[in-house]
Each structure stands twice: as structure tokens, then as C-alpha cells.
Image (spheres, helix red, strand yellow):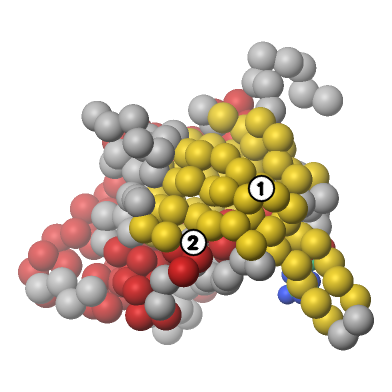
Amino acid sequence: MSDEPLVVVEGLRKVYRSGPKEVVALREVSFVVRPGELVAVRGRSGSGKTTLLNQIGGLDRPDAGRVLVSGQDVTSMSEDALLELRRDVVGFVFQSFGLIPVLSAAENVGVPMRLARMPVEEREARVRMLLALVGLEQHANQRPFELSGGQRQRVAIARSLANRPRLLVADEPTGQLDSQTGRQIMELLRALVRSEGVTALVATHDPSLITLADRVLEISDGVVHEADLAAPAG
Ligand code: ADP
Ligand code: MG
């Protein structure tokens, strides 16, 4: 296995401007994530978690600094290259699930594979495999409104893995779930990072992830510090 970092963040800075007002959401953020790590990003609301994940996943561009994912410079990529990155290299999980309401669980999971033009038989087999992986093989034909919150997030996680991403980016994936369901989702992410060889960056307040993560990055006012997991939380 290579020791090359999967994600390199260097001197990342992001400023939001609305009229004369400026909000510095990220200041000179630098860190690396190695293959197979599950890294939690912890910080209170407004600290810059979503901004950070959006720059890393190629959903937005910073004002300074750069992000490498799998050696590719995400911050200078063309829009076409970013589309490919978000389809093939990075899988996303959001707090609000982001499922398409008129599609079944299986169809939602299959969407990124259709976009990647995966052959039908391979796609159907992979959808079944992924739904089984997240414990939803019995629910393949149900639409999102027929599923619980935890089940919806499992569908979204299965979908995020559709095209075998190297990196999973999850933004407060348990933010809309009760604590017990949230814990189960975090345990699922922990298990998938081990079994699927994926690397994950998860923004959360959820204490259950903090105990499951390999590393915790603390973010406060756009500044990131490595947390010392041996120290008591405070
Ligand atoms: P978190 O995800 O930790 O709650 P965000 O990354 O969403 O934090 O926000 C960081 C800071 O940037 C906050 O002060 C927020 O108000 C501001 N911000 C986020 N998005 C925008 C935007 N599109 N326009 C202006 N300010 C924004
Ligand atoms: Mg956020």
C-alpha cells in the first residue's frame, strides 16, 4: 500500500463576499488525509465545515491555496474535469439525503452508474450488492417517502459508493437523525471505510463518530487543528 496522501490541502482560503461585507470562512487551512483513513471534521455551526468539504469535493473554488485528490489538483480543474471527479472519484453524502423522490431506492443508487454509462447488467448487480451492503436488500423498490430517515441515509450512502469512489465526503450525515439512528449510520460508515477501501472525511457534531474516527480535525472560525484523541473532550 502506498503512503501517498489521498487528499492534500495546502493554504486553503475562502472568503464570501456579499456587498461590502466579507466573511473569511477558511484561513490558511492545511492538512493531509491518507488512504483508508476515516477523518472527522468537528466544529460548531458556522465554523467552516461545509465550506471546507465543498472545496475538497470540487463543489466550489477557494480564493487561495489548493486541494489535491488522488494527485489531481481539484482547485484548478476545468468544469468538465470536475464533473468527472464528482462522478468517479468523490462520493457525497449530505445531511438532507438528496434522494430523488420519484425514484425507488434501487433507482436512486443506480443514478451515478447511469451517468457513468455502466452496462445495465453490471449496474443492476452492483445496485443489489450496494443495497445489501447497507442492509436494505428488502427495501429496493420503496421510494424515499416510504423509508425512515436512517434508511434514506443508507440509500444515500449506497449511492455515494456507486462508482467506487476513492474518497467519501459526508457533511453532517446524521444531522437529521435521532442519536441512536445516527450512531448506526456512523458505525456503517466506519465499517464501509474498512471493507470498501474507501477514505472518508465526515463533518459532524456527533460524539459517536468522534470515538469511531481515526483522526479528528477541529475547525473553529475557519482554522483547522488536529485534535488530540488521547485528551479528554472539552
Ligand atoms: P458550517 O458548515 O461549519 O456550519 P459553513 O462552511 O457553512 O459552516 O459557513 C462558514 C461561514 O461562512 C459562516 O460564517 C457562514 O455564515 C459563511 N457562509 C457560508 N456560505 C456562505 C455563502 N454562500 N455566502 C456568504 N457567507 C457564507
Ligand atoms: Mg455545514
Report the residue at 72% width, 56% height from top.
Answer: 26
Report the residue at 82% width, 50% height from top.
Answer: 221
On the question of residue 47 being in view, the answer is: yes
Q: Give the Cα distance between marks 1 and 2.
A: 15 Å
Q: Which is nearer the eye, 211 or 155?
A: 211
On the question of residue 183 being in view, the answer is: no
Q: Which is nearer the eye, 204 or 150?
A: 204
Q: Which residue is denoted by mark 2 in the rendering?
A: 57
Image quadrant where one finds the C terminus = top right
Q: Position of residue 130 (x, y in %)?
A: 27, 54
139 lies left or right of 205: left
Report the residue at 80% width, 57% height from top.
Answer: 46
Q: Which residue is denoted by mark 1 in the rendering?
A: 29
Q: Is residue 197 above or below residue 28?
A: above
Mark 2 element type: loop
Type of the residue with mark 2: Gly
Ligand 1 positioned in quadrant: bottom right
Mark 1 element type: strand
- Residue situated furthest right in the rendering: 20
Q: Residues within 10 Å of mark 2 (few under 14, many from 20)?
A: many
Q: Residues within 10 Å of mark 1 (few under 14, many from 20)?
A: many
149 lies left or right of 48: left
Image quadrant where one finds the N terminus = top left
Residue 224 disc label: none
